[in-house]
Image (tube, rainbow, N blue to C red):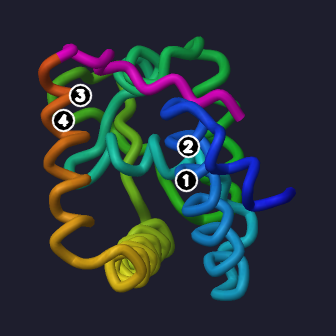
């Protein structure tokens, strides 16, 4: 794509492209570290279940997907060694999903990689401008009461 075309994009497109750029790099680097079976939606799920775990119903609500879809995702992640189901501490019939050691390793790797990406972007546009961008986006998200449900579209 011609870089001049990027100058003509609206804010929504630029935000989407910057998000995709960061996520693509994150997953490329995670794959290089042996976590190639992780997808972006898994990261949203991990973020919600850390540090104390969550029920399937809570995850479905948070991600805006069905309980069945969460169950399929948890089955996949459990087989891959990232999460496990354990007895719910207060609901005898329920299960809670928690991260395994491998799950915590991928979360730590993700945090380091995203910190690296942000630092590199900060070097590119300037640390002060990066901080201002983060503050401005935080203000907009808070002011316009962005949805609390995460709805991954991939």
**To which quarter of the image does residue 61 belong?**
top left
Span highlighted in magenta in the image: 144-154
Label 1: element kind: helix
Q: Residues within 10 Å of mark 3 (few under 14, many from 20)?
A: few
Q: Which residue is mark 2?
A: 14
Q: Which residue is mark 1?
A: 18
- Horizontal relation, residue 134 to residue 33: left or right: left
Mark-to-mark CA distance, 1 and 2: 6 Å
- Residue 21: % across, % down: 63, 60
Among numbered discs 3 and 4, the one appearing first in the sequence: 4
Disc 1 vs disc 2: Cβ atoms closer than 8 Å? yes
Q: Which residue is mark 3?
A: 141
Q: Nearer the viewer, residue 140 or 76?
A: 140
Q: Is residue 118 above or below residue 33?
A: above
Q: Residue at x 55, y 62 (%)?
A: 22
Disc 4 vs disc 1: Cβ atoms closer than 8 Å? no
Label 2: element kind: helix
Q: Residue at x 69, y 56 (%)?
A: 79
Among numbered discs 1 and 3, the one appearing first in the sequence: 1
Mark-to-mark CA distance, 3 and 4: 34 Å
Disc 1 vs disc 3: Cβ atoms closer than 8 Å? no
Q: Nearer the viewer, residue 34 or 88?
A: 34
Q: Residue at x 52, y 30 (%)?
A: 12
């Amino acid at each position: 794509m011609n870089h001049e075309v990027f100058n003509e994009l609206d804010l929504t497109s630029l935000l989407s492209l910057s998000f995709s750029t960061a996520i693509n790099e994150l997953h490329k680097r995670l794959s290089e570290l042996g976590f190639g079976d992780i997808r972006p939606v898994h990261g949203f799920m991990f973020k919600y279940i850390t540090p104390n775990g969550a029920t399937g119903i809570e995850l479905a609500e948070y991600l805006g997907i069905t309980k069945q879809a969460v169950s399929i995702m948890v089955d996949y992640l459990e087989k891959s060694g990232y999460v496990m189901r354990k007895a719910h501490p207060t609901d005898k019939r329920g299960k809670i999903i928690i991260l395994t050691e491998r799950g915590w390793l991928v979360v730590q790797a993700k945090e380091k990689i995203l910190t690296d990406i942000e630092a590199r972007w900060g070097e590119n546009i300037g640390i002060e401008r990066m901080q201002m961008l983060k503050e401005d986006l935080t203000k907009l998200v808070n002011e316009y009461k962005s949805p609390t449900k995460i709805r991954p579209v991939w």
